[in-house]
Amino acid sequence: MTAEKVDLKDDDAYRAHRGEWRMVDLGPRQYLAVDGRGDPNGEAFAPAVESLYPVAYALKFASKDAGRDYVVPPLEGLWWAQDLDAFTRRRDKAVWEWTLLLAVPGWLGGDEVAAALERTRPKAPPRLDDVRLQTLAEGRCLQTLHVGPFDDEGPVLRRLHTEVLPGAGFAPTGKHHEVYLTDPRRTAPEKQRTILRQPIS
């Protein structure tokens, strides 16, 4: 029998509306993760992406062989800098820190990820040894859908931090989180769809 394919995006974490900051409560979730620093258009970013996806597909195919298939979810990223203005005003990408993420379904764990890493090793992804399984517990968050180029996110995030959060009595508590619903390699900048998420307290 063909295993039923689960779409991990069929979840509240992947629902957002343009022009509206929506509150979501997110329990612990696990991801394949790899860290980096600097401009996402620079030399460090592509090797990180190229190392995540082979592991994700090795994990998916092993799960499918065991009877539980799923769609490899979209790329996500945590972003931060010591100075928030580096995101919201100056867009000083050289000082950005980031962790790239691909969600892992809850029925898989450390043993399966370790096996997927070893199955991927012959392909020699550039940063394979830096890929790890990470649990992220964000709790209460506000999120919205941004449509357009990544560099147009600045005013949206500035309004979040200067108007939306203070006006509602909230403060940011975690790292800025983005979910890339479209592939920037295949999508015109004006049509890119990105969920912008901020954990709050």
Image: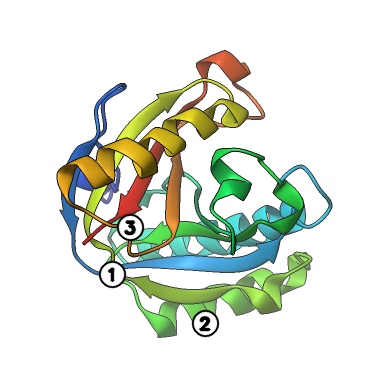
- Residue at 40% across, 58% down: 103
Q: Position of residue 29 (x, y in %)?
A: 29, 66
Circle 1 is placed at which residue position?
A: 137
Mark 1 closeness class: few <14, some 14–19, many ≥20 residues within 10 Å: some
Q: Which residue is mark 3?
A: 172
- Disc nearest the viewer among 2 and 3: 3
Front residue of 73 and 163: 163
Is residue 43 shown left or right of residue 7? right
**Residue 35 versus residue 73: which sits nearer the camera?**
35
* Number of the front mark, 1 or 3: 3
Q: In the rendered image of this protein, does residue 9 appear above or below residue 134?
A: above
Q: In what element is the residue under mark 3? A: loop
Residue type at mark 1 is Ala
- Looking at the image, which residue is at 31% across and 36% down? 163
Residue that label 2 marks: 114
Mark 3 crowd level (few <14, some 14–19, many ≥20, 10 Å Cα): some
Q: Is residue 15 left or right of 117 when viewed as pictured?
A: left
